[in-house]
Image: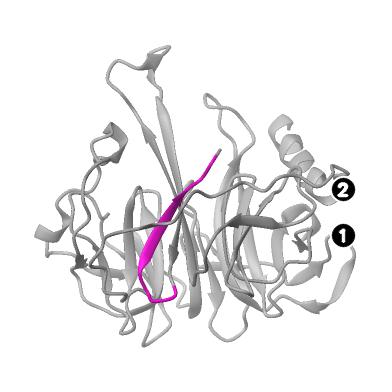
Amino acid sequence: MKNKTTYQLFLITLLFSSTGWATAPQLGAWEQLFANDDGRAIALDVYHETPVILDAKGHMFFVNKEIGKEASGEWFGEVYESWTRVPGGGEAMDISIDGDGVPWVVSINTNKIYHLDGPIEGDFSADTHHSWLEYPGNAKARRISVSKTNGTPYIIGAVSGRIYKGNGAGWTALPVRLLDSQGQQLNTALNALDLFAEAYNTGDSENPDLQELVFAINQDKRVFLFVPEQDAWLELPGNAKATSVVASGKLVYIIGEDGKFYGLDLTSDKQWAPAGTGTGKDLAFSQVDVFQPFASQNGIKTPSSSHRHVWKIGEKGQVYRAFVAY
């Protein structure tokens, strides 16, 4: 009950906070991934610090480096070189990577949802024995987002624009009712263009209680958060209009209609504020907790530091990342 109450208080704070205008979470300078990036990316997600992209033909690529060393600190200082095709074939229109490194896609030919039969990790380019597995339920989608925290997939229906939640055996439709930022019902229903799924820990490290946060951009480009207690989607404050959204806990980032980047702290901000320079086409978020040898507390390994980045596809299809300053 305590954890549920904490989560409700978090959402109530978002609904009715009287906190004044605050400073948006800032992004550092954008760094291009590697100099010879040929600009093929049209969709993007990231596993640890390894970006995975789709090109215009729906082919999937990742950076040709050994994956999975980030948590030991061995990644930093390595040089990105080029894109390597993900084995297994197939073409996709959208991609999301879960917390185990498994890619999920929407087929460019059938709109069906598939995931790879294993994670992208280690010397992945040497392993050519991968295949794609269809998620049960026979759904058709146009966008997908899988929570890296609890692995739950969400999709936007190919025709309806409604958002569905995967339940392991199929899909459950979420409500379409919309509320403005003051909690008043709107006379339109959700018809989503983009979505992002995350989870928020209302417990602690020893007794985690993960509550899902699902964000959607409606057809009018307004930004909403799903509030289960209201069976509705609540518009985030600030009257933003966006084309892409990502989040890390209470911090939310968007690409606005003008192609620029804006940030909002759900627990304090009443307005979106510029969060970085430049423009972009798509967003992803990554966090890597770096563990050093012998660093532990009560016998449990604890991270010595965390590296958080927002990633984007630039105007020419090249991949960049910016450090998140918090």
Q: Residue at x 49, y 54 (%)?
A: 147
Q: Residue at x 18, y 68 (%)?
A: 87
**Foreground pick, 171 / 185:** 185
Q: Report whether residue 101 is seen.
A: no
The quarter in which the C terminus is drawn is top right
Query: What is the tally of numbered marks visible in this picture?
Result: 2
Secondary structure of the residue carrying numbered label 1: loop
Task: Describe residue 136's horizontal placement relative to residue 62 as left or right.
Answer: right
Q: Residue at x 52, y 24 (%)?
A: 206
Task: Describe residue 233's horizontal placement relative to residue 200 as left or right.
Answer: right
Q: Is residue 43 above or below residue 210?
A: below
Circle 2: is it few (<14), some (14-19), or many (20+) Cα within 10 Å?
few
Any magenta on residue 86? Answer: no
Instruction: Look at mark 2 in the image and give the residue it sits on.
Output: 16
Residue 62 percent coordinates (x, y): 25, 63
Residue 203 percent coordinates (x, y): 62, 31
Q: Residue at x 80, y 43 (%)?
A: 13
Q: Is residue 322 above or below residue 216?
A: above
Q: Amino acid at mark 2?
A: Phe
Instruction: Name, please, the residue furthest toward the left.
Output: 126
Residue 201 percent coordinates (x, y): 59, 38
**What residue span does the magenta drawing correspond to?**
315-325
Instruction: Look at mark 1 in the image and give the residue it sits on.
Output: 183
The quarter in which the N terminus is drawn is top right
Q: Amino acid at mark 1?
A: Gly
Q: Earlier in the sequence, mark 2 or mark 1?
A: 2
Rounded to the nearest angstrom, the CA distance separating label 2 from label 1 is 9 Å
Mark 2 touching mark 1, by CB under 8 A? yes
Circle 1: is it few (<14), some (14-19), or many (20+) Cα within 10 Å?
some
